[in-house]
Image: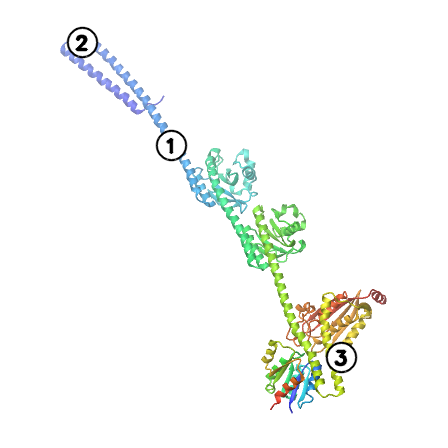
Amino acid sequence: MRKLPRSLRFYVAASTLYAAVVFFAVQFIYTFQLTQSGLLVAQRDSGNVLSSIQIVSFIVWLGISLIAAAVMHRLATALAGAQNAEEEAKTAGEQKEQELGSIFGLSSAIAGPLDLEQIGSYFVAAIRGALPADMTLALIVYDDLLEAFRTVATDGPRSAALREKSYSSVALPAVVRTRVIDHRQSLLLVDDAAHRDMWKKVVEELPALGTAKSFAALPLISRERLVGALLLIGEGTGDLIADKVQLPMIMGQYVAGSIHSALSVKEAEARAEREALVNRVAQRARASLDPEEILRGTVEELAKVLDVSRALVCTGATEDDLAVSYEWDAAGVAPVGIGAKHVPVARLAARLGRTIIVTDVRQDRRFTDPRAAEDVIQQDVMSAAATPIRVGGQLAGALSFSQIDRSREWTADDVRLIEAVAQELRVAITAAEAFERQRTAVVELERLNRAKSDFVSIVSHEFRTPLTGIQGFSEMMASEELTIDEMREYAGDINKDAHRLNRMISEMLDLDKMESGRMQLHRERLDLNAVISDAVDRVRPNAPQHPISLRLDPLVGEMNGDRDKLIQVMANLLSNAVKYSPKGGEIVVSSRAEGGAAHVVVRDHGMGIPKASLETIFERYGRVESAETRHIQGTGLGLPIVRQIVHLHGGTVWAESSVGEGSVFHVTLPRAASGTAAAEAAS
Amino acid sequence: MSKVVFCEDDPMIRKLVRAALRSTSHEVHVAENGKLCLALIDEVRPDVVFSDVMMPEMDGFGVADAMRARPALAHIPIVFMTASVQREQIEECFRHGAAGHLAKPFTMTELRARVAQFFKN
């Protein structure tokens, strides 16, 4: 039975009491008045009538009171109900308003900042209130630069295990990967009897779960892009029923848009940074002409922007020649070493002539060659990218970048950046090489120019010396009293000097002829040893300080050659040996048969030739210029003539020397076929 | 008697100088390189030295410097004979303390006059 309200009970009691008081009052007054007036004759009868009238009226009064009470009770109940409903409606509205308020508050809070951490902390603060206090929540966001999910905000008892962590998509539990990341659906998982196995697996893959009993992963999607996920970890099995995750899900959608914007800004900044890098490379390339310097600065910068562990510049003209010529390593990364040749990724890029990217070396079929794979794994490389550098269609080298700590999905942006930088480097290297060539050419021109003016002064000196004789002797013959014998003698001297002048002029012309290919050899069959002896005989009288010894191999035999020119070769070598051993010393001339060639060696014990000049002495006017040689007369044409004549005969000539100990000149000349045969028969 | 030392590596010029100065009263000594020349100067103590520049062993400048380094020879004038007419090379002669410069080829008259110049008094 419904309990009557107290006020109503009081009302019924009061009205009953009132009715009773009125009844007794009326009874008394009527009885007294009637008795006084004498109307009350038969007290008993009239009293009874009065009593019955009063009782009826009392009952009627009571009935009316009760009806009124009932009506009032109804009214009161209805009123109370209405009031209650109104109150209830008011509370529900407040709650909704609170939720909406937090959503609006969140959306206005996150509309401002573009910093992921800040957005994350607002988000966590906004949903915190709607979730049990012991629930752990974490917002993970896909970081394009890291190419992994990164925890940007977390709260709750297990947050320590989640804070500042990043998870590449392979590091997340498989079920999260497929359900949340690939299919973009919410995942709710509870540690109950039906899901025990799955739960165990997830805990294994995500140790941060620990002893928790329920887990939810909600995808955050904005404009078709999965920007991240909200992870919820509940300590009880019932913590994560669908109703409870509704608010976080709704808020998640608000937050996803902001995260998306923040990521876009970050990515745009990264892109701008990359473009700036390419610009800097181009600028540096224009500012510097030293390829080394360009490479160094660029590669280090590129490595930092790409956030790789190691960057290598390999140089080499062929795939097999590629060797590390510059290396940059991130802190704590063991270097490969300059000159290292195990650069399989760079090599593959060079072979294929395009950029190569390797996400995980150990799972890449292109590196199935066990040796190559071993090389890569030895360097602990997991991911790598390489691009060839080609200059003028020729391979010049390769850039190679590697990641040792993690596998990496190289993005199209990465590839574009690497290729853009390689392109700029190519331009830079081409320019630097062109400059270097130009510079070398200028240096060479300057050297030739100097050599030419030196030559002019040498030649004028050399020409003036015989001219002094010719002029002086002829002057004396013309103006002085001389005997006929003196006349003859002076005329002979004049003749000798004239010949000397003529020889010098012929030498110059000969060299010109030979160098321009207009020289004809007058070939005949000759005995090379005899030619050598002949030349030695001519030089000997002018070199009393230099004993010349001959060690001739009779097996050298005959050859086809120009006798005069070959004598000139030997005479030039011998007179050099004499001239450049001013302190005297033995000169040894030897010949030896070596297969189809004759090898002639002239060895002196003179001042020697610096290593750097061993080649240039064979060039026109390429005399070694030093304090020691300044006083030694020479036209700078002797050795160039030797080389020309030897080359015309199909032979070779080169020098070996150590300064202060002497020089050795080697000449090889082809022997006549029959001579070779005869020599072989003899041996 | 006035003494002259000639230093010249070219045998023809040595012969020419001897012949040209034979008719004069000078006592002519010749050497074929700087080293021999210095020894000759030390031995003969000439009144004047005529020297070529480009020579083996020791060049003409070397001879001049060695003479300046020795008080007994420092006062002897030296004249360089060069085939070069380039200003810098002639200047270098004077930097090495030359008393004169004789350009090759020279005439006999010129040679005799340049020698005689040192014996005017």
C-alpha gap between disc 2 and disc 1:
69 Å
> Share a chain, discs 3 and 2?
yes
Instruction: Let me know if marks 2 and 1 both belong to one chain.
Output: yes
Which residue in the protein does label 3 denote? A541
- Provide the secondary structure element on which disc 1 rests: helix
Amino acid type at image mark 1? Thr
Who comes first in sequence, dot 3 or dot 2?
2
In the figure, A301 relative to A219: above or below?
A: below
Label disc, if present, on residue A153 of the rendered structure = none
Q: Quadrant of residue B47?
A: bottom right
Residue A415 image position (x, y, % from top left):
58, 48
Which is closer to the viewer, label 3 or label 2? Answer: 3
Q: Chain of mark 1?
A: A
In percent of width and height, residue A608 lies at: 68, 72
Label 2: few (<14), some or many (≥20) within 10 Å? Answer: few
Q: Position of residue A4 (x, y in %)?
A: 32, 23
Q: What residue does disc 2 label?
A: A43
User: Is any atom of residue A162 visible in this view?
Assistant: no
Pinpoint the chain carrying mark 3: A
Looking at numbered disc 2 in the image, what kind of residue is underneath it?
A: Gln
Which residue has dot 1 on it? A91
The amino acid type of the residue labelled 3 equals Pro
Mark 2 or mark 1, earlier in chain:
2
Which chain hosts label 2? Answer: A
Q: CA distance from mark 3 to mark 2?
A: 201 Å
> What's the distance in space between the residues labelled 1 and 3, CA to CA?
133 Å
